[in-house]
Image (cartoon, grey):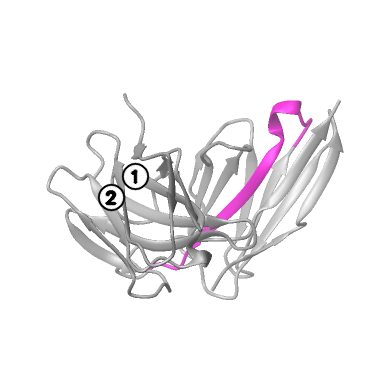
Amino acid sequence: QQPVQSPQAVILREGEDAVINCSSSKALYSVHWYRQKHGEAPVFLMILLKGGEQKGHEKISASFNEKKQQSSLYLTASQLSYSGTYFCGTESGGSNYKLTFGKGTLLTVNP
Amino acid sequence: KAGVTQTPRYLIKTRGQQVTLSCSPISGHRSVSWYQQTPGQGLQFLFEYFSETQRNKGNFPGRFSGRQFSNSRSEMNVSTLELGDSALYLCASSSVAGGQNEQFFGPGTRLTVL
């Protein structure tokens, strides 16, 4: 089942902060975050694993609440380059790998 | 290191035809996943291959199929094309199967069905 992202869209001014949420109805093994700029391929930002391990960019932070099956991506002091669509992808574990993405959050950063 | 490549980048087909898309993963990567991206649905998982074996499949009809070769290159095929198959098809490679590693996406193949 597709995770739900919120908000669907957000507009910021440079320097402002934003939080993007991702929630699932299934128990999660890992949560992935990707950013896609218009006309480009999605680019990896971060992976959060069950148990607390994180892999990703130093300048982007995220949280993973395993009990609530939720993850949040924190974008602080936003820059124009942060603009794009952010996708969370969730994996529920098991023997086979399947990453299910949310519909995305469109982030626009204006000067 | 060269990135993920996909060919062709653009395709225009008519209803009823079939199409084959190709994906070359990053050298050394053995896992290849395919996704369909449309404005309304976001990224929808099609299937994932690891060492020539399909390990998982999304909720798509049997018209969508794929395979992976011994050099990890992958192809996906869509038969009897429908208008609703118009989308950006993305492939992504990863060094291992499983959710612990990042996926590297290719630029995609834009398929238009008329």
Which residue is drawn at the image coordinates 77% and 31% (left, top)?
A78
Q: Is residue A6 magenta?
A: no
Alpha-carbon neighbours of circle 2 within 10 Å: few (<14), some, or many (≥20)?
Answer: many
| Label 1 to label 2: alpha-carbon separation | 5 Å
Give whichever of discs 1 and 2 has the lower sequence position.
Answer: 2
From this view, report whether residue A16 is shown above or below residue B76.
Answer: above
Residue to which mark 2 is pinned: B31
Q: Is residue B11 above or below residue B49?
A: above
Circle 2 chain? B
For the question of whether residue B105 can be seen, the reply is: yes
Q: Position of residue B106 (x, y in %)?
A: 41, 39
Question: Residue at 43% of width from left, 65% of height from top?
Answer: B15
| Amino acid beneath label 2 | Ser
Magenta segment includes A77: yes
Above or below, comparing residue B59 to residue A89 in the picture: below
Whether residue A49 is visible here, answered yes or no, is no
Could you say which is closer to the camera, residue A42 or residue A23? A42
Seen at 33% across and 74% down, the residue is B62
Residue B13 screen position, x and y as percent: 42, 54
| Stretch in magenta | A76-93
Residue behind mark 1: B93
Q: Which mark is residue A98?
A: none
Say whether marks 1 and 2 touch (CB < 8 Å): yes
In the rendered image, residue B14, in percent from the top left (x then y), is placed at 43, 59
Q: Same chain for labels 1 and 2? Say yes or no.
A: yes
Label 2 secondary element: strand
Report the front residue among A22 and B78. B78
